[in-house]
């Protein structure tokens, strides 16, 4: 779970940093354009009235980019806050590990049922749809290999785990 949280926050942080770099470069580009327009006005080649609409347009673009920059910086800060809580997640993971190892059958079934939404097993793989607390409501699918088994004649055997989950051996 800690690795999941770290991977999620690292990916988000990298994405935000990339977007932030693009926005910062665009702001620098707008500033260079404004400087060139101001130079044209200062040299007297064109009047302010001629360039005012373009200057206004570039200033509006710059204001929008700066607002986007502030938003991205805020999101990155939020990502860092989530990462800072990794120690809390690690403690929770240890508590859950203890529950799975020492809890009653009912407690273990309840725990697994709280995040496993669906389990589909085929001959060569198991599909697990589950949700985790971070980020809220995110549905994730993971495929894992199923050990090969052979069945010769008779009804298909079933396996019941110590957690009370039943699977059919295919």
Image (cartoon, rainbow, N blue to C red):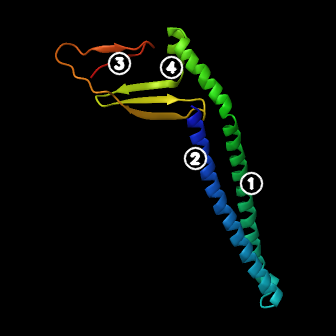
The answer to the question of whether label 1 and label 4 lie on touching residues, with beta carbons closer than 8 A, is no
Which structural element holds mark 1?
A: helix
Query: Observer-nearest residue: 147 or 107?
Result: 147
Instruction: Mark 2 or mark 4: name the one nearer the start of the chain.
Output: 2
Q: Measure how far apart labels 2 and 4 are at the Cα level.
A: 27 Å
- The residue carrying mark 1 is 70
* Residue at left offset 71%, top offset 61%: 65
Q: Measure how far apart labels 1 and 2 are at the Cα level.
A: 19 Å
Q: Quadrant of the C terminus?
A: top left
Which structural element holds mark 2?
A: helix
- The residue carrying mark 4 is 112
Instruction: Mark 3 or mark 2: name the one nearer the start of the chain.
Output: 2
Identity of the residue furthest to the left in this view: 153
Query: Observer-nearest residue: 154 or 101?
Result: 101
Instruction: Mark 3 or mark 1: name the one nearer the start of the chain.
Output: 1
Q: Is residue 47 left or right of residue 87?
A: right
In the displayed structure, 117 sits above or below 81; it is above
Report x, y in % for residue 92.
63, 24
Instruction: Mark 3 or mark 4: name the one nearer the start of the chain.
Output: 4
In the displayed structure, 74 sits above or below 28; it is above
Question: How many residues crowd around disc 4 within 10 Å: few (fewer than 14), some, or many (20 or more)?
Answer: some
Quadrant in the picture for residue 17 = bottom right
Q: Measure how far apart labels 3 and 1 are at the Cα level.
A: 51 Å
Q: Quadrant of the N terminus?
A: top right
Label of residue 11 in the image: 2
């Amino acid at each position: 779970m800690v690795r999941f949280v770290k991977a999620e926050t690292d990916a988000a942080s990298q994405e935000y940093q990339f977007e932030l770099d693009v926005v910062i470069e665009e702001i620098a580009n707008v500033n260079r354009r404004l400087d060139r327009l101001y130079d044209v006005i200062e040299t007297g080649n064109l009047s302010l009235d001629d360039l005012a609409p373009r200057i206004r347009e570039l200033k509006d673009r710059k204001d929008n980019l700066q607002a986007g920059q502030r938003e991205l910086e805020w999101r990155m800060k939020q990502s860092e806050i989530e990462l800072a809580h990794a120690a809390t997640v690690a403690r929770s993971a240890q508590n859950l590990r203890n529950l799975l190892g020492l809890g009653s059958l009912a407690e273990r079934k309840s725990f697994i049922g709280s995040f496993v939404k669906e389990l589909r097993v085929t001959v060569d793989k198991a599909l697990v749809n589950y949700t985790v607390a971070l980020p809220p409501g995110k549905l994730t699918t993971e495929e894992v290999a199923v050990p090969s088994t052979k069945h010769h004649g008779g009804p298909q055997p079933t396996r019941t785990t110590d957690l009370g989950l039943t699977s059919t051996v295919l």
